[in-house]
């Protein structure tokens, strides 16, 4: 009975402490640096991994949470991402554009901040310095739609694509048939529009780069931090702590509480890690095949099929 009472008491105290620090709804706020008793906060917004659901929705909700907290005086955006879906990268960028109207920002690149990761960073605006670690990779400006041509393999097994459709482009990018000239023209137009948008956000987000300069860099190439500094893609070489110190100096705050935002992990997540969600909800082979065949325009460094 004493053990049970002790456990209940400790859980109650833990809950009260979390409520004090984080409020009652996810994402939960966690103290990570500075002075715990300080009233003024710097919010550390982490953009990590491939930018796609459900992680992108967590990032968007976190930005909303930050924007509603008047005690947040500045935002440190830390990015360690190869990019991801075009739409999700742009949503994060758009939310950051609105957030920067309220608070100053500084960006810090970790191991990699490429393609959609770099796109999202542009939301901080031209007046927000970008730091990159000495070993960071960035750039990879471009768009990709992952696709595999399995037509020859299918033919060797006697498999032929024979979809019932209402138009010649309804099954475009079918992996079991070669891409036609008409399909390639359609998708080239879509890719060009996405690339133009990417170039545009960099043109707006970097003072020392213009449209022509960005297009020269838009080959999909990834750059080291030293190269990125010379090409004006970043402002300084330094780690997350250097970026944080810069932001605190800008704010003129001697004492500040640095906080991050987290989502509670369920038991399966805790035991199995980041793959838990996929293992928790297995899909049948047909669903996986249909999902793999859905075209996805991506601001992504390398090849990846979600």
Image (cartoon, rainbow, N blue to C red):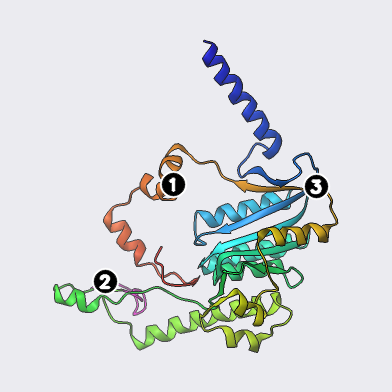
Lower position in the chain sequence, tag 2 or tag 1: 2
Image mark for residue 163: 2
Asked if residue 70 lies left or right of residue 124, the reply is right
Residue on which the image places disc 1: 273
Separation of disc 2 and disc 1 at Cα? Answer: 39 Å
Left or right placement of residue 218 versus residue 178 in this view = right
Please give the residue where the numbered disc 3 appears in the rendered image.
40
Q: Judge from the rendering whether residue 27 lies leftward or rightward of residue 171; answer left or right.
A: right
x, y percent for residue 40: 80, 47
Do labels 3 and 2 touch, CB within 8 Å?
A: no
Q: Which residue does the image show at 32% across and 62% down from the upper left?
A: 290
Q: In which quarter of the image is residue 235?
A: bottom right
Q: Is residue 103 visible?
A: no
Secondary structure character of the magenta stretch overall: loop
Q: Is residue 166 magenta?
A: yes
* Location of residue 203 in the rendering, given as x and y in whole percent from the top left corner: 68, 80
The reply to whether discs 2 and 1 touch (Cβ–Cβ < 8 Å) is no
Q: What element carries label 3?
A: loop
CA gap, disc 1 to disc 3? 33 Å
Specify which label sits upstream in the sequence, 3 or 2: 3
| Nearer to the camera, 183 or 281 | 281
Q: What stretch is highlighted in magenta?
A: 162-174
**Front disc: 3 or 2:** 3
Q: How far apart are marks 3 and 2 (CA)?
A: 60 Å
The residue most toward the front is: 134
Q: Which of marks 1 and 3 is nearer the N terminus?
A: 3
Quadrant in which residue 171 is drawn: bottom left
Front position in the image: 72 or 67:
72
For image coordinates 84% across by 51% down, the residue present is 254
Q: Which of 124 and 131 is in front in this view?
A: 131
**Residue drawn where x is 64% and y is 79% of the image:** 200
């Amino acid at each position: 009975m004493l053990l049970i009472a002790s456990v209940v008491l400790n859980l109650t105290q833990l809950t009260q402490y979390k409520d004090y620090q984080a409020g009652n709804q996810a994402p939960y706020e966690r103290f990570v640096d500075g002075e715990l008793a300080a009233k003024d906060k710097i919010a550390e917004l982490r953009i990590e991994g491939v930018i796609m659901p459900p992680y992108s929705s967590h990032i968007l909700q976190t930005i909303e949470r930050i924007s509603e907290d008047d005690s947040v005086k500045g935002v440190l955006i830390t990015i360690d991402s190869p990019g991801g879906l075009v739409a999700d990268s742009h949503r994060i960028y758009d939310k950051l554009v609105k957030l920067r109207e309220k608070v100053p920002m500084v960006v810090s690149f970790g191991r990699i901040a490429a393609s959609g990761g770099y796109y999202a960073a542009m939301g901080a605006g031209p007046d927000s310095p970008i730091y990159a670690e000495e070993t960071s990779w960035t750039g990879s400006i471009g768009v990709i739609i992952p696709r595999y041509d399995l037509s020859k393999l299918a033919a060797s097994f006697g498999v032929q694509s024979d979809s019932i459709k209402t138009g010649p482009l309804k099954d475009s990018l079918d992996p079991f048939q070669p891409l036609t000239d008409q399909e390639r023209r359609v998708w080239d137009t879509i890719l060009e529009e996405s690339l133009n948008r990417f170039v545009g956000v960099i043109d707006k987000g970097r003072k020392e780069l213009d449209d022509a300069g960005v297009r020269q860099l838009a080959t999909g190439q990834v750059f080291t931090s030293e190269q990125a500094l010379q090409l004006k893609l970043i402002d300084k070489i330094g780690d997350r702590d250097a970026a944080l110190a810069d932001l605190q100096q800008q704010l003129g705050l001697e004492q500040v509480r640095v906080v991050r935002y987290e989502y509670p992990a369920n038991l399966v997540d805790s035991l199995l890690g980041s793959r838990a969600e996929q293992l928790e909800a297995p899909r049948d082979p047909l669903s996986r095949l249909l999902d793999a065949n859905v075209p996805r325009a991506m601001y992504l460094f390398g090849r990846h099929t979600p």
